[in-house]
Image (cartoon, grey):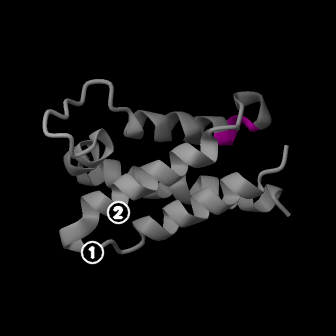
Amino acid sequence: MDFSYPSEKFSTARRNLMLPSPSHEAEDIAMAFHECHLGLLDVRPEDLDDNARLWVTVLKGLMDTTDTEDPTGRGKWLIKAERLSADDKIELVRVVDELAHWFARRSR
């Protein structure tokens, strides 16, 4: 599989998470969620090794909006981003960075 598109998307997601503006942190995280979502659209679990599959599982858990209500239409990922704990944010940055590196190494 050609991983150049996922590599591009995860690189953008990583940039969104680098020192986000305190007043726009949730928006930056929501944008990173969107980039990760796009980067994973055509990636099948069998295309990944065990480490990458684990990182994707963790990422999808952090991005999951199943129990998120959005009565005002602000966007479920924005609401989810606002509710992430400090530990969740650290984990998000870690797995996005790992996946950005993983896809970049395989897109060359």
Q: Residue at x 53, y 49 (%)?
A: 36
Q: Which residue is mark 1?
A: 21
User: Dot 1 lies on which element?
Assistant: loop
Where in the figure is residue 63, as x and y percent of width and height?
Answer: 40, 39
Judge from the rendering whether residue 89 lies leftward or rightward of residue 40; answer left or right.
left
Q: Closer to the N terminus: mark 2 or mark 1?
A: 1
Q: Is residue 90 visible?
A: no
Residue kind at label 2, given as amino acid type: Asp
Image-quadrant location for residue 48: top right
Viewer-nearest residue: 99 or 21:
21
Judge from the rendering whether residue 69 lies leftward or rightward of residue 90; answer left or right.
left
C-alpha gap between disc 2 and disc 1 = 8 Å
Q: Which mark is residue 28?
A: 2
**Which residues are drawn in magenta?**
48-52
In the rendered view of the protein, which quadrant contains the N terminus?
top right
User: Dot 2 lies on which element?
Assistant: helix
Q: Are marks 2 and 1 in contact (CB under 8 Å)?
A: yes
Q: Is residue 29 magenta?
A: no
- For label 2, the crowd category at 10 Å Cα-Cα, with few meaning under 14, some 14 to 19 and many 20 or more, is many
Q: Main structural element of the magenta stretch: helix, strand or loop?
A: helix
Where in the figure is residue 71, as x and y percent of width and height?
Answer: 14, 33
Residue kind at label 1, given as amino acid type: Ser
